[in-house]
Amino acid sequence: MSSKQKIGIVGAGIVGLSHAWSAAKRGHSVTVYERTPKAYGASIRNFGMVWPIGLPHGKLYQIALESRDCWLELQKKAGIWINPCGSMHLAHEEDEWEVLQEFANIAPNLGYDCNVININQIIKKCPSINTTKLKGALWSPTELCLDSPNAINTIPNWLKETYGVNFFFDSLISKIQHPEIIDSNGESNSFDQIFICTGHDFQTLYPSIFKSSGIKQCKLQMLKIGSQPNGWSMGPHLAGGLTIRHYKNFQSCKSQLKVKERYAQNSPDFDKFGIHVMASQNQSGDIITGDSHDYDQPNDPFANEEIDNLIIQEIEKMIQLPNKKIKHRWLGLYAKHHDLIQFINNPESGVTIVNSTSGLGMTLSFGLAEAFWRGEVLTKNQPG
Ligand SMILES: Cc1cc2nc3c(=O)[nH]c(=O)nc-3n(C[C@H](O)[C@H](O)[C@H](O)COP(=O)(O)OP(=O)(O)OC[C@H]3O[C@@H](n4cnc5c(N)ncnc54)[C@H](O)[C@@H]3O)c2cc1C
């Protein structure tokens, strides 16, 4: 996009904010519409993990590192709380340990910065780790921890002050007819370019495109455990065998299959509910943990206690928490595509739908938006 344009964005989650920032940096005049008084979507319901280690090597990993730099820039410029805590994948079984060692061997050639560590080294990073059955861990210094509600609600003010981006909250957009964005009161504004960044709910504006997109909505179940005693620190983000069987980076390891098969045979409930358990610690000291994945009934509003119990069982396997009281339970919804990391579509000239379909929007969105505004439309990984 060459000359300075009027850009209208629908949705103030991480995808809308990323495009607002990228456009504003380039001198465009940007306006963002958000239907709720502040963002309440997937972007505030997550773990707050910036998780490059989970991405397959190649272009996507580079995009995740670019996003990471953007978050660190926001830490300095917008005062957003970020803990550069890194991550540990813990192995409690021989087959998990095999995957971590296989990955650590190939990782430097693939561009990852990580190594395996022994139990003493794990304890130094996370003094409350549960050492029962622990074999070792994969340590990566790259991952960041955000307090997502804080970050997502701070960025609009910063964009407004720094670049004059206009925000209209409590503003439901009911129709797009380029060049007009029309709200539910029938008021309209015109823009050169319109971006639809409405997360799992872009079917309200473009139902037929949503239907044919191949996107599925996914419901996730999450928990907050706290408050932990003052000064108690978990250390790095934690993940375990369920994550080792799940994330794409480990698909480069032949030994991953054994872990998948063991879980499928011995603990089928984890597969049934799509559970893989991770933990982060926010700025108040609370532990954010989850999650499960339900693609069959994403709109079913009920949380399932059986899922909570399985998540807690896995957390207890990883760490001895001083306080185990559950403070909050919530559901999140996101859009997911089996093949695409983002769905990009032009339903009419001047209108672009940008939908994060990776399940890793906090990790990728800044980098993907920058790539888009540089003219690279990336929807799949390009192996390095
Ligand atoms: C439980 C859970 C855990 C996750 N954990 C992580 C993690 O740790 N790390 C990571 O990288 N990713 C994580 N993700 C994924 C990540 O949160 C999402 O990929 C990302 O937040 C999607 O951002 P979004 O802007 O597309 O959607 P949203 O955050 O949902 O934003 C869309 C916005 O559009 C608004 N909107 C919709 N329709 C309209 C309309 N018609 N008019 C006006 N406004 C509208 C909505 O109100 C909403 O605020 C997680 C997701 C979930 C659900």
Image (cartoon, grey):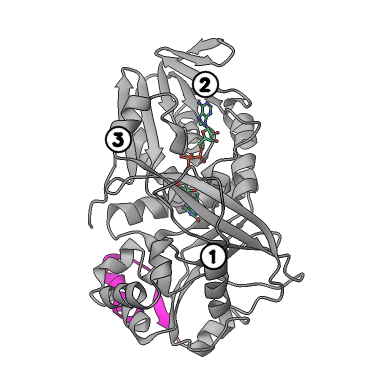
Mark 1–mark 2 CB contact (< 8 Å): no
Picture coordinates of residue 161, whole percent (x, y): 64, 31
Whether ligand 1 has any atom under 8 Å from the Cβ at mark 1 is answered as no
Magenta segment, prevailing SS (helix, strand or loop): helix
Answer with the quarter of the image where residue 254 lies.
Answer: bottom left
**Was residue 65 drawn as part of the magenta stretch in this picture?**
no
Q: Amino acid at mark 2?
A: Ile
Q: Amino acid at mark 3?
A: Ser
The residue nearer to you, when weighing 292 against 131, is: 292
Residue 306: which disc? 1
Q: Is residue 374 above or below residue 183?
A: below
Residue marked by disc 3:
213
Q: Secondary structure at mark 1?
A: helix
Residue 173: which disc? 2
Q: Residue at x 37, y 78 (%)?
A: 266
Q: Is 232 placed left or right of 59 in the picture?
A: right
Q: Which residue range is magenta in the image?
A: 100-117
Whether ligand 1 has any atom under 8 Å from the Cβ at mark 2 is answered as yes
Which of the marked residues, 1 or 2, is nearer the chain's N terminus?
2
